[in-house]
Amino acid sequence: MKTVVLKFGGTSVGSVDRIKKVANIIISYVKKRYKVIVVTSAMSGTTNDLVKKSKKISNNFISSEYDVLVSSGEQISCALIAGRLNHLGYRSQSWMGWQVPILTDGNHGSSRISKINKKKINKFLQSRGIPIIAGFQGVNLNNRITTLGRGGSDASAVMFAKFFKAQKCIIYTDVDGVYTTDPNILKKAKKIKVISYEEMLEMASLGAKVMQPTSLQDARLNRIDVDVKSSFTNKEGTLITKRKNIFNKKTIAGLTSTKNDAKVTLLGVKDKPGMAASIFKPLSKNYVNIDMVVQTSSGNKRETDITFTIQLDDLSTTLKLIKQNKKIKYRDLIVNKNVSKVSIIGVGMITTPGVTYRMFQTLANKEINILVISTSEIKISVLIEKKFVKKAISALHKEFKLD
Ligand code: ASP
Ligand code: MG
């Protein structure tokens, strides 16, 4: 008998009615003679509420108790699913992370699964039971509850698929797959049938909120095929798999844009070794994530301008740290909150020349000014004024034949 892991996200288990639907989906796999392992997230909104409560108690809430608190939402959805399956005459039982146990490494709030103990779950599966696992949580060597970072039930599902050698890992969510770009921005966006881990990882890190990026790293590392599907419709979803399995490759798989970026420019910074390090050191110490960076020399070789982008949430901290920083001198500081990073992603660009040029020319034709550029092997990102995002996405979508 083949094993399948079914993961249900927050909206899929968002109400009692939804949970009844989920139970029916689970049963449909049992009827197809699969051994089914279910991993569930908390009912939508629950985890956010718990995080809010922790902040009201303390803005420095102790991380070990934070994990006990925020992992509790999954206990509710697990029990409701198992309860429904029992009601319908199926043998089912809920399992919290510590009961399995799911062992994790790393810090509270951002742990990673290192091992899943298979014994009890296997025994239950053999007796035709349907285990319902609380996603997002585990237990560390001190026997304390840990969590895997927001959205972490995706990682739980992928790791169960790995340890139980599942034939499939299906992520049920509220969208029916991964799209070439955000359908809210461009109506013409198309569902992607198959996408590589690498491309999906870039898309998820660049703003496509379909799966947690760390879970995609786990899937890639362990070569787990992941299907993303909607629990609301019965449509075919998107398969995330290794490059080798993908035929009929397009140069560009998809486009993304960000919503909450800010650009900071320091004009007239002294051009000497260590300057950039002095600017970024306090930022990194305070966990401000720097995204794009450019340095331009201003001709006379004595001064340069440094521009970088950060999350809008980090802007006030960043400005405070720069103004307090006695090690740096600059002539002026400019902030732009109306920027967005637009990216094209595709493994095809490794082997196709001229992609960079085509991107820049397409934007030029639309008279969109590029503020900052950054590239990696399989993506090109440009920072542009927010008001041009729709225009840019639509032109690029057409240029790279995704329409
Ligand atoms: N319930 C957790 C969260 O909201 C985990 C998840 O949804 O994957 O982050
Ligand atoms: Mg989620």
Image (cartoon, rainbow, N blue to C red):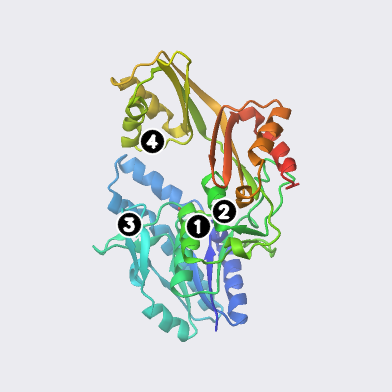
**Residue marked by disc 2:** 200
**Residue marked by disc 1:** 216
Q: CA distance from mark 3 to mark 2?
A: 31 Å
Q: Amino acid at mark 3?
A: Val
Q: Residue at x 28, y 53 (%)?
A: 64
**Residue 294: numbered disc:** none
First in sequence: mark 4 or mark 2?
A: 2
Q: Amino acid at mark 1?
A: Leu
Residue 243 relative to residue 390: left or right: left
Label 2 Cα crowd, 10 Å radius (few <14 / some 14-19 / many 20+): many
First in sequence: mark 2 or mark 1?
A: 2
**Residue marked by disc 3:** 68
From the image, which quarter does the N terminus lie in? bottom right
Ligand 1 near label 1 (Cβ, under 8 Å)? Answer: no
Label 3 Cα crowd, 10 Å radius (few <14 / some 14-19 / many 20+): some
Give yes or no for contact between labels 1 and 3 (Cβ–Cβ under 8 Å).
no
First in sequence: mark 1 or mark 3?
A: 3
x, y percentage for residue 119?
A: 37, 80
Give yes or no for contact between labels 2 and 1 (Cβ–Cβ under 8 Å).
yes
